[in-house]
Amino acid sequence: MIADDTLNRIYGGAGKVYGEDYCHLGYLAGGETAQGAFIRDPLKACPQDFYGTPSSSLPICKGLSNGKDVQALIYFTTGYTAEWIRQAGPLGVPIIAGVITVLGPAQEAFVQSGQLKGLLVGMRGGAEYEIIMDEPGSAAAAMDAQSLGHLLFILFIIFGNASYFIQKKYGKKPVGGGAQS
């Protein structure tokens, strides 16, 4: 549902027509096996779109027989990108990935080797993309909130350490929880 909302907001908002300029084929379960099936024959792997319409009836899918027929493979994942690289890479299809923050460093080798043509990492990457596109949105706003939260966390650490050293310097015992003699 999130992908559907995002596609419709972005493409629909740009005047693009669903089925002609873009489509949503939904989630394809099965991991790398499903990814391989999609690359070999997208319409067989996804016989209908997210709405239940036969994929073969969508104008954008006309002439789509295998992964070589797409201009680029763009996907977002909470997992690794190696599966898509193994399946689509040999076809020469440009691959662009969006991954969660903790996976970013592990994917950099694929960017450096040219196996990934683009990589968007986490909320920060999303915010940077919004700013580059001159369309700040939810990721940029969320980064503001996250940055403020990090600043408060740092201030609490400084306050806690200062409090500890002040108590230690003046010989006061820490308040609460200490053993009594």
Image (spheres, rainbow, N blue to C red):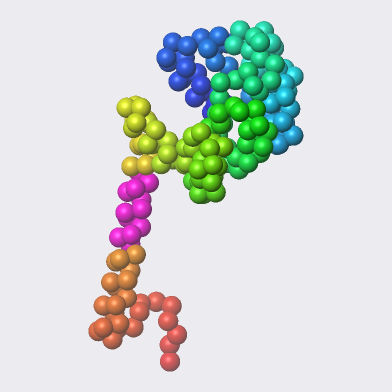
Q: Which segment did they paint magenta?
A: 145-156
Q: In the shown orientation, is residue 181 left or right of residue 43?
A: left
Q: Quadrant of residue 110?
A: top right
Residue 181 on image: x %, y %: 43, 92
Residue lying at the far bottom in this picture: please name it: 181
Nearest the viewer among 163 and 117 is 117
Nearest the viewer among 44 and 39 is 39
Nearest the viewer among 124 and 180 is 124
Q: How many marks?
A: 0
**Quadrant that contains the N terminus:** top right
Q: Quadrant of residue 168?
A: bottom left
Q: In the shown orientation, is residue 34 left or right of residue 141?
A: right
Residue 76 on image: x %, y %: 55, 34
Whether residue 3 is visible to the viewer of this picture, yes or no, is yes
Vertical placement of 34 versus 65: above or below?
Answer: below
Residue at 58% x, 16% y: name it.
23
Vertical placement of 21 versus 175: above or below?
Answer: above
Residue at 49% x, 34% y: name it.
118
Q: Quadrant of residue 107?
A: top right
Residue 96 on image: x %, y %: 53, 32
Residue at 29% x, 77% y: name it.
165
Residue at 72% x, 31% y: name it.
36
Q: In the shown orientation, is residue 131 left or right of residue 54?
A: left
Vertical placement of 176 versus 16: above or below?
Answer: below
Whether residue 100 is visible to the viewer of this picture, yes or no, is no
Residue 166 on image: x %, y %: 26, 77
Residue 67 among magenta residues: no
Q: In the shown orientation, is residue 108 left or right of residue 65?
A: left
What secondary structure characterizes most of the magenta part? helix
